[in-house]
Image (cartoon, rainbow, N blue to C red):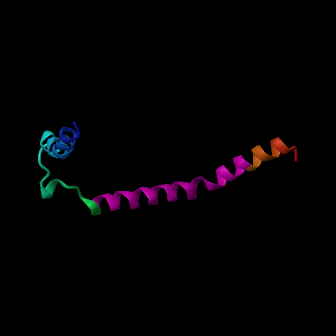
């Protein structure tokens, strides 16, 4: 039984690889593209935060004043 499990474990990666097709070099992904997407997303978040910060700060201070009664 252990031998059959070991054989199945050795064959599993081959089955997965052939089930989804062989991966060629040009299909491995575009790392610089993902880096660019990540940096652009971070820049958008920072820009939105800078624009919304005064309003968010005012909402927070108003809510805290209502809770504390000051």
Q: How many numbered badges does the structure rendering display?
A: 0
**Which residue range is magenta in the image?**
33-60
Q: Is residue 10 left or right of residue 32?
A: left
Q: Residue at x 76, y 43 (%)?
A: 63
Judge whether 11 appears above or below 54 on screen.
Answer: above
The stretch drawn in magenta includes residue 69: no
Q: Residue at x 11, y 48 (%)?
A: 22
Q: Residue at x 65, y 55 (%)?
A: 54
Q: Is residue 41 left or right of residue 15?
A: right
Quadrant of residue 26 in the image? bottom left
Q: Residue furthest top?
A: 1
The stretch drawn in magenta includes residue 45: yes
What main secondary structure does the magenta stretch of the protein show? helix
- Coordinates of residue 31 in the picture (x, y in percent): 27, 61
- Coordinates of residue 66 in the picture (x, y in percent): 81, 42
Q: Is residue 37 left or right of residue 43?
A: left
């Amino acid at each position: 039984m252990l031998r059959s499990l070991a054989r199945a474990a050795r064959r599993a990666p081959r089955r997965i690889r052939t089930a989804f097709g062989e991966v060629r070099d040009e299909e491995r992904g575009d790392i610089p593209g993902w880096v660019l997407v990540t940096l652009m997303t971070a820049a958008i978040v920072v820009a939105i935060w800078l624009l919304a910060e005064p309003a968010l700060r005012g909402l927070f201070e108003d809510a805290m004043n209502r809770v504390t009664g000051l």
